[in-house]
Image: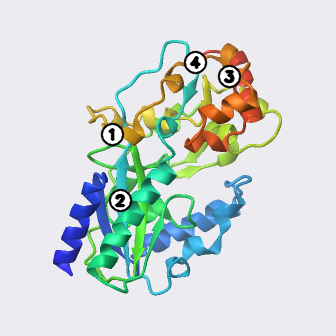
Amino acid sequence: MVDLADTLKQQARQLGFAAVGIASAAGSERLQLRSAALQRWLAAGHQADMAWMADPRRRDVQALLPGVRSVVAVGLPYYVEAERAPGSLKVARYGWGRDYHRVIDGRLRALGRWLESEMPGVGWRACVDSSPLLDKAWAEEAGLGWIGKHSNLISHEHGSWLLIGHLLTTAELPADRPAVPSCGACSACLDACPTAAITEPFVVDARRCIAFHTIENRDPELPEAIAGALEGWVAGCDICQDVCPWNQRALSSSSDPDLQPRAWWLDLRGEEALDWSDAEWDEKLRASALRRIKPAMWRRNIRAASTAPPA
């Protein structure tokens, strides 16, 4: 199976995944600790309105694919060397290109079909972060990177600008070594969060998080504490990643056509966007991960960001 695993990784790289690793579906003691940490996070109410985080399948990979023996983790670096125009509103980098769910899912399915051609009858399932899987914990288990104090996966090569996906399979493939945490004593992400959403290392309270409120909160108005601290963010937030030392190094800019930013993301003007009709928003958000934010929510976020004190 070693040769098959090596060829599988080569195939994944040909599909555009710059990082690929394999974990045993049995999991390690650290994976059990990650699962226990999820339970504590849920018990504390840190998930806010994201009820899907409590899906019990998230703690049992066998429930997603009975008979699964291996978890193939893949990473798609999404850092693009592009700058927002001065004075423009801010959109999280992961949303600049095409909907990464579609991009990663399509490529994982191609990888699964390739594996099936090599092993007729093998079972597989493609999973992106919309699947009830401990995705970052499994990526850590497969050696792609470690979970940082801001709860994002960090890679030595790509920093935290790494979109991840997984191919579950019934094939028993040799596992890679889990990643070694390398945050050390750094607290840059905790110190930089304007709403103190990172309440302690590795714990993000969604109820305080700008990304949660600008994307998931369906209320007509944002909480006052959030609205007053947006610092221009209207769709997600990259502050904790921007300050991470692992992202301060010179990183390779992705040339993947699916990840290149739409020009208007880099020059989003509130006064113009507030006049866009629902149909215009619908057109601009086609094949975007940020289509989850409905037009009324965009207007709410833009109004709040436009009246909040500058960063």
Could you tell me residue 57's position as x and y percent?
59, 74
Q: CA distance from mark 2 to mark 3?
A: 35 Å
Between label 2 and label 3, give the one nearer the viewer. 2
Q: CA distance from mark 1 to mark 4?
A: 23 Å
Residue in the picture at 44% in, 51% down: 103
- Residue tagged 4: 311
Q: Quadrant of residue 165?
A: bottom left
CB atoms of marks 1 and 4 within 8 Å: no
Q: Amino acid at mark 4?
A: Ala
Position of 75 relative to 287 (above/below): below
Could you tell me residue 61's position as x and y percent?
50, 77
**293 vs 138, nearest the viewer:** 293
Tell me the SS state at disc 3: helix
- Residue tagged 1: 246
Mark sitting earlier along the chain (2/1): 2
Query: Residue 86: in sight, yes or no?
Result: yes
Q: Amino acid at mark 3?
A: Ala
- Residue tagged 2: 74
Between label 4 and label 2, give the one nearer the viewer. 2
Q: Quadrant of residue 296?
A: top right
Residue in the picture at 30% in, 77% down: 117
Between label 3 and label 4, give the one nearer the viewer. 3
In the rendered view, does 120 fall on the left or right side of 263?
A: left
Q: Quadrant of residue 260?
A: top left
Tally the numbered discs: 4
- Residue tagged 3: 305
Q: Residues within 10 Å of mark 3 (few under 14, many from 20)?
A: many
